[in-house]
Amino acid sequence: MGQAVATLAEERGHAIHTVITRIENDGGRALTRERLRGADVAVEFTRPDAAVVNLERLLALDLPTVTGTTGWTENLPRVTALVRQRGGALLHAANFSVGVHLFIRTAQELARCFKGRAEFDVSIHEEHHQTKVDAPSGTALLLQRHLWEAEPGRRFPITSIRAGDTPGTHTLTYESQHERVTLGHLTKSREVFAAGALAAAEWLPGHTGVFTFEDMLFGLSR
């Protein structure tokens, strides 16, 4: 994902200040003031076990940061405290696809329509490539949270599959004895995530606080 963002950024006329790889950045050691001097924004796509240290180092350097890493948000309060302490800027998202976020908003409205209809069972199904570390996906968990807002009494269970090289598929299904209603989103290419992350990186400088991709797209206040 980092390479995809860098390639697209150059195509759009941005200058890539530096690319930091996993091998050289054990414990965030490559994220130094000298290495990052002159950068306007950092884009972080790594792994859950590296993300928090990376974010803390980038924020300590007062560098606005966009992260698409998932599986670390149990530490979001800790990172948020640092953003507030430093007067910094962070945009985090489980998914940078515009279509996914429109799908989630539509799914929430569907959940409102089905609220209280106990004859329908409901489930979330998500499938990703076999190398994806976290399960359920961050997008499935985000979808689940929005559905709980629409109908707190429902469980909205998630089924996850890790196989092949699927970039990402998410499906919401309501099923009764005689009928089924399905709403889904299929990612055809990882480039859609790069485009969204780059749009976030273009938007974030000049803002202060912790934001999500939804905030950028829809102007939600948090």
Image: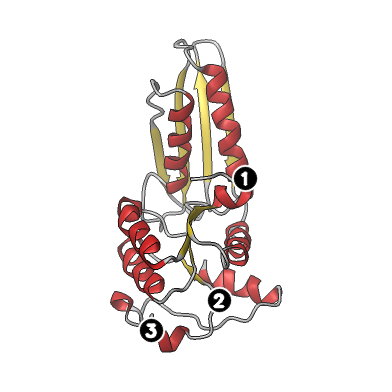
- Label 1: how many Cα within 10 Å (few below 14, some 14–19, many 20+): few
User: What separation in Å lies between label 1 and label 2 (alpha carbons)?
Assistant: 24 Å
Q: Secondary structure at mark 1?
A: helix
The residue that label 3 is drawn on is: 32
Label placed on residue 218: 1
Label placed on residue 40: 2
Q: Earlier in the sequence, mark 1 or mark 3?
A: 3
Q: Which is more toward the observer, 135 or 42?
A: 42
- Quadrant in the rendering for residue 189: bottom right
Q: Secondary structure at mark 3?
A: loop
* Residue 149 spot, x, y in % from top left: 46, 29
Q: Give the residue drawn at x 51%, y 70%.
A: 2
Image: 73 above or below 207: above
Side of 89 relative to 191 (left or right): left
- Label 3: how many Cα within 10 Å (few below 14, some 14–19, many 20+): few
- Label 2: how many Cα within 10 Å (few below 14, some 14–19, many 20+): some
Label placed on residue 178: none
Q: Give the residue drawn at x 51%, y 22%.
A: 174
- Quadrant in the rendering for residue 156: top left
Q: Earlier in the sequence, mark 2 or mark 3?
A: 3
Q: Amino acid at mark 3?
A: Thr
How many numbered marks are there?
Answer: 3
Q: Earlier in the sequence, mark 1 or mark 2?
A: 2
* Residue 147 spot, x, y in % from top left: 47, 30
Q: Amino acid at mark 2?
A: Asp
